[in-house]
Image (cartoon, helix red, strand yellow):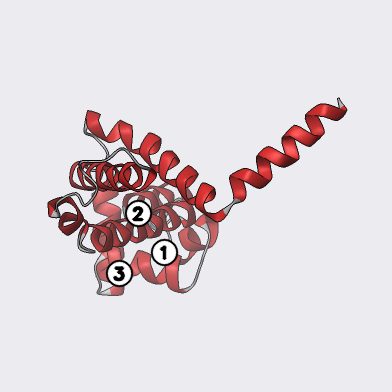
Amino acid sequence: MRYTQYKGVVEREYKKSLRKIMHELCVVEGLDAVEGAMRLGVAKTIFEYWRNFYRYDDNQRLFDEKVRELDKLHFLYVNEGEKKILQEPLKHSGEASLDGFKEQVGKIGAYYRQVQAESGGLAVEASNLPLFEFVEELLHRYEAGELLEEVAKNSASGKKG
């Protein structure tokens, strides 16, 4: 018999769609391939085929769950108002100061985040995002005094060596 013929036999016996049957066996009851195949009365390879087809293998379900979480985060990010930041005029446009630099880095970082979110990371411009995120992180570390501590620690240890 073929997979579709086995499918028809199992669906008639359980009076449910194969997807629902496989969900009950793999997700609800947590049966492995041998136990599930024995329960349905089919070969283990057929059960494994159906489990993979409906994505009820443990690794597949975990992967799908993580993808859904990422999609949810993507949706939240796109809707959190980054476009407002891009449309606001620069406050420090006519000066060369740390505040102006910080503002410009934040604005261009927001732009690249938007490009990455809208393209799903496939736009060539999106490859610039890690650079600007790194610069933003350095600015935050500078303002918090962490860079000064690191410089002091490394210069002190450099003199010893």
- As drawn, the label of residue 20 is 3
Going by the numbered disc 3, the residue's amino acid type is Lys
Q: Residue at x 32, y 50 (%)?
A: 53
Secondary element at tag 3:
helix
| Residue where numbered disc 1 is placed | 40
Q: Residue at x 39, y 43 (%)?
A: 133
Looking at marks 1 and 2 on the same chain, the residue that comes earlier in the sequence is marked by 1
Residue at 52% from the left image edge and 47% from the top image edge:
142
State the image coordinates of residue 79 (x, y, percent, origin top left).
20, 63
Left or right for 141, reference 68: right
Question: Disc count in the image?
Answer: 3
The answer for how far apart the CA atoms under marks 3 and 2 are is 22 Å
Q: Where, by quadrant of the figure, is residue 51 drawn?
A: bottom left
Please indicate, yes or no, whether residue 2 appears anywhere in the rendered image. Answer: no
Q: Position of residue 130 (x, y in %)?
A: 39, 37
Q: Residue tagged by mark 2?
A: 67
Please identify, in this view, whether the residue under mark 3 or under mark 1 is nearer the observer. 3
Which element type, helix, strand or loop, lies under badge 1?
helix
| 66 relative position to 16: left or right | right
Residue 16, horizontal then vertical, whole percent: 25, 72
Of label 3 and label 1, which has the lower sequence position? Answer: 3
**Given the image, on which type of amino acid does mark 2 rest?**
Val
Circles 1, 2 touching at the beta carbon (< 8 Å): no
> Would you call the spot at circle 2 few (<14 residues within 10 Å), some (14-19), or many (20 or more)?
few
Is disc 1 surrounded by few (<14), some (14 to 19) or many (20+) residues within 10 Å?
some
